[in-house]
Image: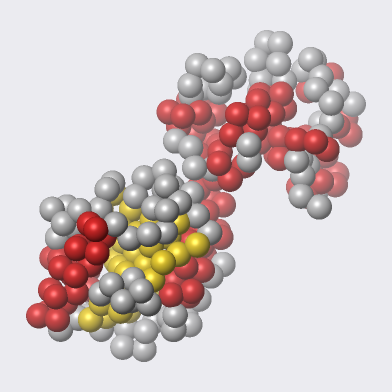
Amino acid sequence: MPHSLFNEPPIRYTTIKEWPEDERPREKLVKHGASSLSDAELLAILINIGTKNTSAVEVAKRLLREYSSLKRIASLFVADLKQTKHKGIGTAKAVTIVAACEIARRIAAKENDTNAPIRSPEDIQQRYGPELRDLKQEQFMVVCLSSANKIIRDRIITKGLLNSSLTHPREVFREAILENAASVILLHNHPSGNLEPSREDIAVTKQIVEAGKIIGISVHDHIIIAGDGYTSMMERGLM
C-alpha cells in the first residue's frame, strides 16, 4: 500500500536525534529498507536537518501538505523550493531535492530505453513520458531513428513555448543529418496537461514535415506528452 500523510508517525516537536532509534528515518531505512519509510520520511533524509524548533520530517510534511504529492514536488525548480514560506529549505537542500527527483526521472526513462525498434506512439510515450511529463516548461525534442526504426539519438531543440521562429527546420534536421538518420519523430510536452495540439503546434509540424520531404528525411510523427497521456498528431491526421 502506498504511503501517505495519513499513516505517518505523529508530529513531534523535538529533534530527530531525540526520537527512538527505530523511528528515525535513516535508521529505519538501514534496518527495514527504503520501502518502509513514508513519503515525508524519505524527503526528510534529503532535507537532512530541520530548523531550530522543527525536525526535518516536519519540514518535509509541510512541503507535502503544500504540494499534495511527491510527484508535484518533483516538478519544482530550486527557486520554488527556496520560497520564504518553506522554512528550513535553503539552496543546498533545494538542490539536493531537485537532483534526487531528476535521478528518479532518468531511471524511469532508462527502464524503457531498450534497443527495440519504435513501432507505435506508445513506444515513444513509454520511453520519454517519465522524462517530460512533470516538467514545468515546454521542451521540444527530435528523436533520430535508423532505417530499422531504432533510436539513434535524441536532442532537445528548444525550451519554452513552441513557435516557428524558434523551432527552425535546420535545427531539427541538423542532428538527423549528422547521425545519418533515416527518419525522425518530433516530441514535446504540455505542462498544462492539455493534450490538444495548438495552432502553433500544427503549423510548426507542417513546416518541418515539408522541409523533411526536401531533405529526404521523413517525419514519422509529432507526439505531445501531457501528464500520463499523449497525443499522436499522425494518428489525428494533423500532419
Residue drawn where x is 44% and y is 35% of the image: 77
Residue drawn where x is 43% and y is 28% of the image: 79
Classify residue 61 as left or right of residue 230.
right
- Asked if residue 99 can be seen in this view, the reply is no
Question: Residue 65: where, in percent of width, then height?
Answer: 65, 30
In this rendering, the count of numbered labels is: 0
- Asked if residue 142 can be seen in this view, the reply is yes
Position of residue 166 relative to residue 27, above or below, is below
Classify residue 161 as left or right of residue 82.
left
Quadrant where the image shows the C terminus: bottom left
Residue drawn where x is 60% and y is 29% of the image: 66
Front residue of 31 and 208: 208
Position of residue 19 relative to residue 167, above or below, is above
Front residue of 130 and 164: 164
Q: On the image, which quarter does residue 187 sit in?
A: bottom left
Q: On the image, which quarter does residue 152 sit in?
A: bottom left
Q: On the image, which quarter does residue 150 sit in?
A: bottom left
Question: Residue 207: where, in percent of width, then height?
Answer: 15, 68
Front residue of 136 and 198: 198
Question: Residue 149: where, in percent of width, then height?
Answer: 37, 84
Q: Residue furthest left?
A: 214
Identify the colour scheme used: secondary structure
Residue drawn where x is 24% and y is 64% of the image: 202
Question: Residue 105: where, in percent of width, then height?
Answer: 52, 54
Q: Residue furthest bottom?
A: 148
